[in-house]
Amino acid sequence: MTTFDLVGRSGAGPRQDAAWSPRQVLITNLRAIRGRAYPRWRGMFREKSWIFFEILLPFLQTAAYVLVYRSLHAPEAYVGFVVLGGVMSAFWINVIWMMANQLWWEKSQGNLELYFAAPMSFMSILFGMALGGMVMSASRALAILLIATAVFGVTFSVQSWLLVVLVFVATLAALYGVGMVLASLFLVWGREAWHLGQALTEPVYFVSGLNFPVARLGLLGALSVGVIPLATGLDAMRQLVFSGAPFPIGTPAPAIELGILVLMAVLSTGFARWMLAAMEQRARRDGRLTIRWQ
Amino acid sequence: MIESDRPSLDAAQQPASAPSEVASAPAHGSVAPAHVSVAPVHGSVAPVLAPAPGAAVADANDAPLAIEVRDVRRVYKAKGGPVNALAGIDLEVRSGELFGLLGPNGAGKTTLIKILTTLLAPSSGTARVFGFDVEKDLKQIRRIMNMVAGGEQSGYGILHVREQLWMFSQYYGMSGAEGWRRSDALLERVGLADKADRRVSTLSTGERQKMNLARGLMNDPWILFLDEPTLGLDVAAARTLRELMLEWKAAVPGRTVLLTTHYMAEADELCDRIAIVDHGRILAIGTSAELKRRVQRESIFRVELDRLDGGAAALAREPGVVSATPVAAADERTDRQGVAINLVLDDDAALSAVVGALSARGSRILGLEKSEPSLEDVFVELVGRGFGDEDEPDEHRDDGRSGASDDRDEHAE
């Protein structure tokens, strides 16, 4: 058989081949998620520079805060706070630079129109990006956690492992949900996406209490817990893994924050879906989003 | 390698706008002799022609329609005012056809492809692909089509070539194993098997475009949209790509290709039918031969003789001869003996009388070639300018004229 023979088709004709069953649609979307996650997973092993840029450099920043807290004789739990913040920062970096900015880059490469022209839902592309990003970031986060724990001798006092896992998963779901929303927004804003990414990095770090308990920010802290997944997830995880801390470390209880995270995940995913539909409609109407220079 | 039954375009792989090539050695593809001179457009320049009645649409009894476009218009909003990219296109492409859209940059070819591939909505009019409406049946169309553009940089440089193809196979719902099998098979077929485990970022332009074609064939589409697929490729790579397109299309009846190009020779060689597009309008549709016939009102021959008593002027007085002029010295081939005459006849039937007259004068015919117009001549006849003589972009604004482009403006910045 030559490769130009008919493959994967009924052979009955184009109209018959265009009629897909719901199962076929579902399978295609699941495989599309896997397909889009693949380059991220593969790239992780193929491009080793991330070990330096995304593990060693963030570790230096974490180390600086640890040294500051220790020189000030702050409670030892603060060291753990900083380490956990460093771990979670890997995910936010990934969300900003490899989710939010990604579609803009895909557009400039010509991938975006190929994705639109393929039969799967574009949400599968976003899910694939998110899944690949999570795997990528999780490995980095784990590396930072292990190194920092070993170097600084952090001890954890876990209240509930189940809750920790649930909060972690919900935090990632909410974070990447926000990433999916930002991806559409950044695409619409086009060339400002790069600046927008930069503008969202440090302020979010700050209001998320990456290197200190967010409760210290008072009203601003409470507000950030209510709207920023990174802040909510960090706050909940700190409460759960440093349960013996000799000072108040979080505002709402972890279970409530878990609820907030789940809500954020659902809302952001739904909003991302709506945004994508609106974006595609706009793209087709205005001819703006699939044309590279616009 | 595929043995194509069509002539190679090696010498003719030139942009239509390359003046020197157009002036001296037009690409006649399979129709004209290799060394034939340009057939001048005789008589006054005709006004821009609408497609001949019946030419724009396929016969009702023919194969089912793969593409059906009715009065499609597309207006872009731009800072300088609305831009008419398509100004009322009517088109029918039969299932199994390799149809070419030929026109200069900015003619509206890419806009039409974007509409048919569901990436762009028409401002008005209707377009269907295998009966599916581009506005309502997006999913259905996307399941049976694919697209490849010239100079495409799609995918991810960090992936290996076969991984890249596999990734795209997943977007069409193939199983993992089938995706790998098909990736390897297509790479073998396009001659990239030895590059399968190299990073995409290391491929040359020609290799990359072969990989892109393999990507476009990954889902075995019923209709393949090719937007300037050989743009920027060297002669050998372009030829390979054209051969692959032809072979793929021929392998299964009903596979359809819509090709945009501004390479005249490419359209001439590949396409079953061609639409000449300019300023968002289709000016003429037909086979290459039909289009050429539209501009050839007289028969033009080049005759080489051992001698000609009385000179060319004597020949011009023969019945049916419009003109007889000696071939300019600059156009003479160095190995020619005797004289060469360009003969313009009322029609081919006059040739026998001329041959008889030459014989009566004692002239021996050393060579006889019929000159045919090129697609460039057709375009010049229709538009009044060549491919290379484009208007300035701001002349395409919506000031009552039609025209303009996305594909020229796309590279404006």
Image (cartoon, rainbow, N blue to C red):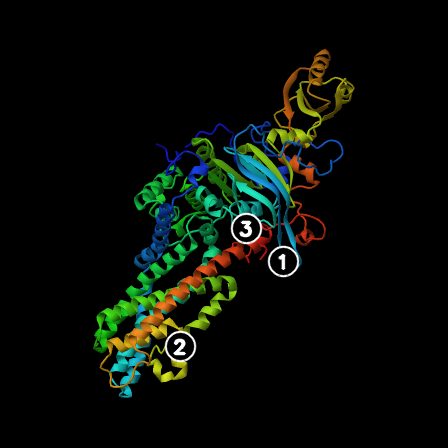
Q: Quadrant of residue B253?
A: top left
Residue at (35% x, 43% y) in the render: B183
The type of residue carrying mark 2 is Ser
Residue at (27% x, 80% y) in the render: A79
Q: Nearer the viewer, residue B363 or B349?
A: B349
Q: Image check: B104 left or right of B165?
A: right
Q: Which mark is residue B120?
A: 3
Decide: is B314 above or below B37: above
Work out whether mark 1 precedes mark 3 in sequence or the reverse, and give the earlier one.
1
Q: Nearer the viewer, residue B315 or A184?
A: A184
Q: Where in the figure is residue B178, as x and y percent of width and height?
A: 32, 42
Q: Nearer the viewer, mark 1 or mark 2?
A: 2
Query: In this rendering, does residue B307 appear at all?
Result: no
Q: Residues within 10 Å of mark 3 (few under 14, many from 20)?
A: many
The type of residue carrying mark 1 is Ala
Residue at (57% x, 33% y) in the render: B273
The type of residue carrying mark 3 is Leu
Quarter holding the C terminus of chain B? bottom right
State the separation of the CA atoms marked 1 and 2: 40 Å
Q: Where in the figure is residue B356, as x and y percent of width and height?
A: 71, 13
Q: Quadrant of residue A253?
A: bottom left
Residue hosting label 2: A224
Q: Residues within 10 Å of mark 2 (few under 14, many from 20)?
A: many
Residue hosting label 1: B78
Q: Image check: B223 left or right of B84?
A: left
Q: Residues within 10 Å of mark 1 (few under 14, many from 20)?
A: few
State the separation of the CA atoms marked 1 and 3: 16 Å
